[in-house]
Image (cartoon, rainbow, N blue to C red):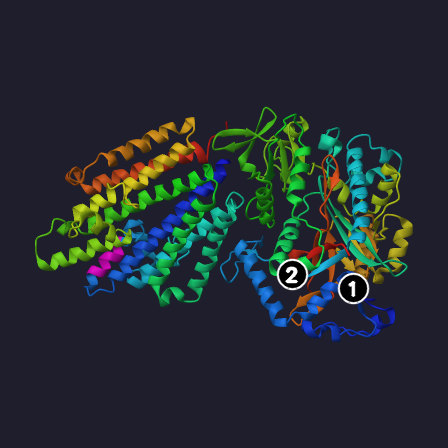
């Protein structure tokens, strides 16, 4: 298949996944902000959200003070923000349009319909009337686009490059989420036993879990009260947690296998090595060496794998 | 001007007295709005009865449904410039009209013969002007008209192309108008031999009609068109220069911001071939390759939707990034086919059009089956004299003009405009041709006020590989503005499904 086509497919899914994760984080923050809490705590949440996407400086330049309204505006409908939901959905659709002939009719129409609808919802005020509903909708369009692809596309390179985009993006996004949320909670990470803090902890950690659809999974897997180290274990190491780093890297490796060419073997080696560390890693070791350092290194390596994929498949040098 | 409609016969006397709005109004009442003596033509009879039974509300709902589907499917053309208010970027829908344009099968059979004859002669002509130039030696066409033409590509002299076919895909624009005897006749208005577009709308319009009105297709024997992509692929594969049994065909597009991008993607998908951009191709040792995830892959046939000027920056426009450097070398070495061939523009220029009937006689020894619209060439002093005396009744066109520019429509022009244009013609007569203002046929069409007659044309797509073939019909374009003759989509034209009907 054409390298350029692979590139568009890969980015189409990266952007769709990014839009979904942004919607997830906004939704949880929005729901949390409805709980009784101090203004300072609420602001920490919105600030954290901007930090995840490394957008705090550009937000401040445009909007000044961090407010719920400002952040929602900036992260949902601001077309000058390349990470906003509208920008991600536009990029996903533009990439789809560039290769619409490679996609099944169903995949293309799903992408196009999402784009037409999101414009309608933002224009008609539907988003402001019920932000929660809007975020759910973004999530479901992403679920739908993955499902339609798996359910209708020939299982060839096209699909593998799309899947590669999805899971590399997911690995990146989950890592960022965990990093920022643990960073925010660092001062009371190991708790000091006070009742008030325990309550705060519960909402803090359950919000993270809910943002990755992991709250019920946590209960099912651990049958225990919510403990930060277990949240970290679930989101980093559990291979059966669909949005964990380990599960995402499993998919990255298997899809890399499927598109593999000779030039891809070094990329595969790097991805496989990273996966192995998650496979054989233990959460107490990771916490002992420092979670932030671990995640920063993980993000660098995911980023490196992304560049290698581009180099190997998407933008090869002239033969 | 005498009215000449596809659906209704109009007796000459009644035609004169009929008011402008005679056929307007909601669909139920239209049959009452007709002047006495007007009848539905035979091939529209069943359709006319069906239409009279449809409520205005139902037809309105169908129009909205069609628009919604076209948007969702993304059948749009890109417009350069401002954004839509709905944020859909720069993509617009081409208006689709629900009322089909119907042509009786026996009329189509004659038209088809004429198209095959014409395209054969045009291909013989293009081969000739890049080889022996016999038609010039015989004095049928003045040599300087060809050799000084901007569309003549000296790079193509002596280049042999497979099957000696240059125009693999030809879009021949046809209009129907009354002839001297007052009968409807199909005339060729223009030949499009470079990168004719619109075939995707022909296919999508049919799909839409079958989806909206399945019952119409069980009541009519409408000739199918859906096999066009198959014929196109067969044509392209037959044009492969190599001995490879499985030639690799690609569609070359300028990219997703081109106005016809939808069509490029559509045809590539329907044929199951790669849609490439210039950046995806490279030339090595005079062979063309595309960059794939598994390394370079040889390309044998390029169905290009990029103009000659942009194909190869080493030969044509040096700043072009839409093509592929070295492509012409590979082409001239016979290692790749370019469809349509480079240099076909020399045969579809307005200054060459008047000679096509003579080409048919010269190369095929036959009388033309389809006539040209009578054309005066101002370069001939006789013609010039006539044109200058009759400017107010003629349409005068610059030979290299396109899209309705550089044109005088005599009956619609002011006295001053006619005078100015006359001066321009006298200053450089060979730059102009003139044609009588034809009474182009109309077809009932949905407009804001209801159903009203609008002018139409027809573009059949003629494919030439080892042999000439086409699907029955073509793209009917309709000028939506009242009285307008301009059917181009860029100027508010719409499309209709075209039925070739067995009756």
Q: Main secondary structure of the magenta part?
A: helix
In the shown orientation, is residue A277 left or right of residue B117? Answer: left
Badge 2 density bin: few <14, some 14–19, many ≥20, Cα 10 Å: few
Badge 1 density bin: few <14, some 14–19, many ≥20, Cα 10 Å: many
In the shown orientation, is residue B141 left or right of residue A277? Answer: right
- Mark nearer the N terminus (2 vs 1): 1
Badge 2 and badge 1 both on one subunit: yes
Separation of residues labelled 2 and 1 (CA atoms) = 25 Å
Please, which residue is most extreme toward the right here? B382
Please, which residue is most extreme toward the front here? B218
- Residue A222: in sight, yes or no? yes
- Residue B150: in sight, yes or no? no
How many discs mark residues in the rendered view? 2
Chain letter of mark 2 equals B
Residue highlighted by disc 1: B5
Question: Can you say whether B84 is above or below A283 in the image?
Answer: below
- Where does the image place residue B347, in percent across and percent down from the top left? 77, 41
Q: Residue at x 75, y 30 (%)?
A: B157
Residue closer to the observer: B142 or A48:
A48
Residue highlighted by disc 2: B215
**Which mark, by number, is residue A70?**
none
**Magenta stretch holds residue A42:** yes
Chain letter of mark 1 equals B
Please, which residue is most extreme toward the top here? B285
**Magenta segment:** A41-48
- Where does the image place residue B215, in percent across and percent down from the top left? 65, 61
Q: Quadrant of the N terminus of chain B?
A: bottom right
- Where does the image place residue A73, in percent across and percent down from the top left? 35, 61
């Amino acid at each position: 298949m054409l390298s350029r086509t692979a590139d568009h497919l890969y980015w189409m899914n990266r952007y769709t996944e990014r839009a979904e994760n942004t919607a997830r984080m906004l939704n949880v923050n929005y729901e949390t902000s409805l709980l009784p809490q101090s203004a300072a705590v609420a602001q920490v949440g919105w600030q954290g959200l901007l930090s995840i996407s490394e957008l705090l400086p550009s937000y401040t330049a445009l909007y000044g003070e961090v407010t719920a309204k400002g952040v929602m505006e900036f992260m949902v409908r601001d077309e000058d923000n390349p990470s906003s939901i509208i920008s991600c959905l536009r990029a996903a659709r533009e990439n789809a349009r560039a290769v619409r002939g490679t996609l099944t009719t169903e995949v293309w129409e799903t992408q196009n319909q999402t784009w037409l609808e999101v414009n309608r919802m933002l224009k008609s005020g539907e988003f402001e009337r019920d932000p929660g509903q809007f975020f759910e909708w973004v999530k479901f369009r992403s679920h739908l686009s993955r499902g339609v692809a798996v359910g209708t596309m020939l299982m060839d390179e096209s699909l593998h490059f799309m899947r590669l985009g999805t899971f590399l993006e997911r690995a990146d996004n989950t890592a960022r989420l965990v990093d920022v949320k643990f960073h925010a909670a660092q001062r009371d990470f190991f708790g000091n036993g006070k009742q008030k803090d325990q309550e705060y902890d519960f909402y803090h950690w359950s919000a993270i879990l809910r943002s990755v659809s992991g709250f019920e999974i946590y209960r099912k897997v651990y049958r225990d009260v919510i403990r930060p180290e277990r949240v970290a274990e679930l989101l980093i190491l559990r291979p059966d947690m669909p949005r964990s780093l380990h599960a995402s890297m499993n998919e990255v490796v298997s899809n890399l296998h499927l598109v593999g060419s000779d030039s891809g073997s070094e990329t595969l080696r790097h991805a496989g090595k990273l996966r192995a560390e998650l496979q054989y890693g233990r959460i107490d070791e990771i916490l002992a060496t420092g979670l932030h350092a671990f995640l920063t290194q993980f993000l660098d390596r995911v980023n490196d794998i992304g560049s290698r994929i581009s180099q190997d498949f998407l933008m090869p040098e002239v033969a | 001007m005498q009215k000449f409609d596809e659906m209704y016969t109009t007796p000459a006397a009644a035609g004169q007295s009929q008011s402008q709005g005679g056929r307007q109004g909601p669909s139920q009442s239209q049959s009452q709005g007709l002047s006495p003596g007007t009848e539905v033509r035979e091939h529209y009879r069943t359709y006319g009865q069906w239409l009279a039974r449809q409520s205005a509300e139902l037809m309105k709902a169908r129009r909205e449904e069609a628009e919604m589907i076209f948007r969702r499917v993304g059948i749009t053309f890109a417009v350069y410039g401002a954004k839509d208010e709905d944020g859909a970027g720069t993509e617009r829908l081409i208006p689709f009209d629900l009322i089909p344009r119907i042509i009786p099968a026996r009329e189509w059979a004659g038209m088809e013969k004429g198209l095959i004859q014409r395209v054969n002669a045009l291909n013989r002509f293009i081969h000739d002007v890049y080889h022996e130039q016999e038609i010039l030696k015989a004095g049928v066409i003045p040599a300087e008209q060809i050799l000084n033409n901007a569309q003549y590509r000296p790079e193509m002299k002596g280049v042999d192309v497979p099957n000696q076919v240059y125009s693999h895909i030809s879009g021949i624009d046809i209009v129907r108008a009354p002839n001297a005897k007052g009968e409807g006749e199909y005339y060729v208005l223009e030949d499009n031999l470079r990168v004719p577009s619109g075939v995707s709308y022909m296919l999508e319009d049919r799909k839409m009609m079958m989806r909206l009105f399945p019952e119409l297709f069980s009541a009519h024997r409408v000739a199918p068109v859906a096999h066009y992509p198959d014929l196109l692929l067969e044509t392209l594969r037959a044009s492969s220069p190599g001995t490879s049994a499985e030639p690799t065909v690609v569609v070359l597009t300028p990219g997703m911001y081109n106005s016809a991008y939808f069509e490029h993607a559509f045809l590539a998908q329907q044929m199951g071939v790669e849609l490439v951009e210039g950046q995806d191709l490279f030339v090595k040792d005079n062979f063309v390759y595309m960059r794939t995830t598994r390394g370079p892959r040889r390309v044998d046939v390029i169905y290009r939707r990029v103009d000659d000027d942009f194909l190869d920056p080493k030969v044509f426009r040096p700043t072009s990034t839409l093509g592929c450097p070295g492509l012409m070398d590979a082409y001239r070495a016979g290692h790749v086919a370019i469809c349509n061939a480079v240099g076909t523009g020399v045969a579809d220029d307005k200054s060459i059009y008047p000679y096509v009937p003579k080409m048919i006689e010269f190369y095929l020894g036959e009388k033309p089956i389809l006539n040209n619209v009578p054309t005066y060439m101002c370069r001939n002093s006789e013609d010039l004299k006539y044109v200058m005396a009759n400017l107010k009744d003629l349409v005068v066109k610059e030979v290299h003009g396109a899209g309705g520019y550089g044109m005088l429509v005599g009956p619609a022009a002011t006295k001053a405009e006619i005078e100015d244009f006359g001066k321009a013609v006298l200053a450089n007569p060979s730059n102009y041709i003139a044609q009588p203002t034809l009474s182009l046929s109309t077809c009932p069409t949905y407009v804001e006020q209801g159903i009203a007659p609008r002018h139409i044309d027809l573009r059949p797509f003629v494919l030439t590989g080892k042999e000439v073939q086409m699907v029955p019909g073509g793209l009917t374009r309709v000028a939506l503005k009242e009285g307008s003759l301009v059917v181009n989509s860029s100027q508010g034209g719409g499309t209709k499904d075209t039925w070739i009907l067995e009756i």
